[in-house]
Amino acid sequence: MIIMRNTRKSVWAVWACFTVMMLFAALTAGPRDPFPIGHCMMSQGAVVETEGVSGRQPWTSAAFYRDTLRWGVSAAAVGYHGVGSVSQYAVGGFGTLGPVVCKAAIMQLDAMRVYYEQTFAVSAGSAWRSLTFGLDAQGYRTGLYGQSFNTRTMAAVGAALHIQTNRISADIATQGFTVLSSGDPESDPVPHITARVCTVRNKYGSQGAMIRITPVDAAPVRFVLAQEYRIGALFALSASIASNPTTIGFGISLDKSPVNGSAAVVNHPFLGWSRGVSVDYAR
């Protein structure tokens, strides 16, 4: 009996180490998340509606918000690897102060109670005619539970510019420029650029395409395509596919103002099927 218990503990330890290693291979320091969390998980970030839930998510740039709502709060959760042992949670909100939009969010990633990652994100932006723009900053704290001497702290900044016409929505953003290093370059956020083109919501829903360029990666270019199909005014179904690595996502959302919700799944070659939910309240 004792031998069997020791064997089970050994198998659990090996499995835990393997899972954490695979997690590190897929995401390290917030900006390397394998896909966005919250409402944008459905489209893997390829569709953002500036007058919808995806535009007011507090963990995205204020440049993506163009609406008449004055304030709101959001929460999201993701279980990676198909189980709750690797998960990420986020809460935050937005508010408008005259012509200025401000966002703030806190995120916590937990890997099997072995590794943790905390992120604090703030953004401020405004609009001028058909343009919206935002300045963003993120602070990170990573480490192993019970080992405070292994804690790393870092900070990064970025900016985004968005333009919208009657039919097309487009943006370009730069993120991950380290202003406070952890002392370990491999742990610091990495600079990357994203460019996205979406259709403004139409009778078929919304369609979007996004390219992300991370120069330091072995495969620096990633493409994402997504389709969100509207079912009346309340529901939307979404499907998305991305490259490098190949990921496939599906989701459903419910828009019933002032409360909105979504649920999504994304298949990742390292993480398997990940499941996420989000809820949003805005007025």
Image (tube, grey):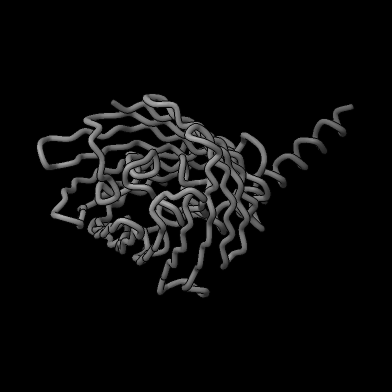
Residue 237 x/y as whole percent? 57, 43
Residue 14 x/y as whole percent? 72, 47
Residue, far right: 1
Q: Nearer the viewer, residue 212 or 191?
A: 212
For image coordinates 26% across by 40% down, the residue present is 67
Give residue 75's quadrant in the image: top left
For image coordinates 67% across by 46% down, the residue present is 273
User: Quick one: quadrant of the C terminus?
Assistant: top left
Residue 136 x/y as whole percent? 24, 51
- Residue 63 in view of the camera: yes
Q: Nearer the viewer, residue 58 or 33?
A: 58
For image coordinates 43% across by 66% down, the residue present is 212
| Count of marks, rendered view | 0
For image coordinates 31% across by 64% down, the residue present is 172
- Residue 114 in view of the camera: no
Q: Nearer the viewer, residue 201 or 19?
A: 201
User: Quick one: quadrant of the N terminus?
Assistant: top right
Asked if 283 appears above or below 15 in the picture, the reply is above
Residue, far front: 203
Q: Nearer the viewer, residue 115 or 274?
A: 274
Asked if residue 41 lies left or right of residue 186, the reply is right
Asked if residue 138 lies left or right of residue 101, the reply is right
Residue 134 x/y as whole percent? 21, 52
